[in-house]
Every structure is written in C-alpha cells, then in structure tokens.
Image (spheres, rainbow, N blue to C red):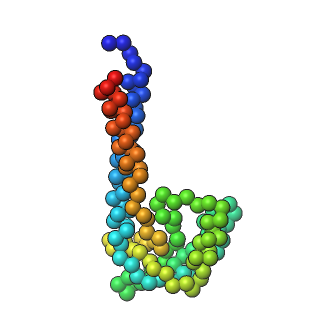
Amino acid sequence: MPFNPYTVILLAAALGGLGVAAWGWRVLQRSRRAARWPSVEGEIVESRPGEGSELLPRIVFRYVVDGREYRSPYRLPEGAHPFSDYSRILLERYPVGRRVTVHYDPEDPARATLEPPRVDWLPLALGLAVALGAILALLLA
C-alpha cells in the first residue's frame, strides 16, 4: 500500500479532535461544579483601574463563610477574554461598598468568584465533531 499523506493528516485531526474533546469535557465538568457553588453576600473593598497595560482593574471583595472572613480578587470567568472597555464596565459594576453575591468553593472557601462560569459545551462538541469527521473520512477512504 503506497504512503498516503492524507491518512497522516486525518489521523492527526482525529487525535487533535480527541484532545480538544478531552479538554472540553474537563472544562465542562469544572464549570458545572462551579455553577453549583453556594453563595453568600459580600462587599467590594477595592476597585481601581489596572496599572500600566493591564486590561483588568484591581477589584477585591470580602465575604464570610462559617464565621471566617475571606478576601479575594476579581478573576475573569473561565473562557472570557477582556476587551478595551471591559475595565470601565467592571469598575462601574463593582464600585467600593457595593454589596455583591459571592459564589465560593465549598471544599476551599478561599476560592471564590463574583461571576460563576457558564456551562459551555462548545469545546467538547467541536472536538468530538472533528474527531468523528476525521475517523469517518479514514474509514471511507
């Protein structure tokens, strides 16, 4: 059987698709867990523009879980990407003194977020589609 470079390309696509699907499954599971984290009321204690070329402002919030106070910086939800006006929007949304809902990890209450990640199936679906398409093309070739 002669060497067929398309077979190598399709194998690479299938393996790459499976890798993306595995990563997508992990992201999906992590975001589903975080979406079910309990919440408490908290307060913004620091809110100022980022320094230099930072796109994100410095926002810190405090909250209490089981009688213990925690402080945490604002973090982007997984998969989010800041844009030029994002800092201004966040500073308007989270001024100092604003009462906020804080979602925290019950296994590690120091890990918290103001915006839980949305459950995103897209990486898993795209990875599976690429892998299945490549495998099908290999079988039909």
> Can you give x and y, in whole percent of width and height, for residue 136 in the image?
32, 32
Farthest residue, direction front: 140
- In the drawing, does residue 39 fall left or right of residue 58? left
> Can you give x and y, in whole percent of width and height, for residue 67 in the image?
37, 87
Farthest residue, direction left: 139
Residue occupying the point 33% across, 38% down = 132
- In the drawing, does residue 50 fall left or right of residue 30? right
Q: Residue 5: in sight, yes or no?
A: yes
Q: How many marks?
A: 0
Quadrant position of residue 66: bottom left
Farthest residue, direction right: 52
Residue occupying the point 51% across, 85% down = 99
- In the drawing, does residue 92 fall left or right of residue 100? right
Residue occupying the point 51% across, 60% down = 80
Q: Residue 110: in sight, yes or no?
A: no
Quadrant position of residue 47: bottom right
* Foreground residue among 113 and 90: 90
Q: Quadrant of the N terminus?
A: top left
- In the drawing, does residue 54 fall left or right of residue 36? right
> Can you give x and y, in whole percent of width and height, for residue 140 in the image?
31, 26
Residue occupying the point 34% across, 23% down = 141
> Can you give x and y, in whole percent of width and height, for residue 111 in the image?
42, 71
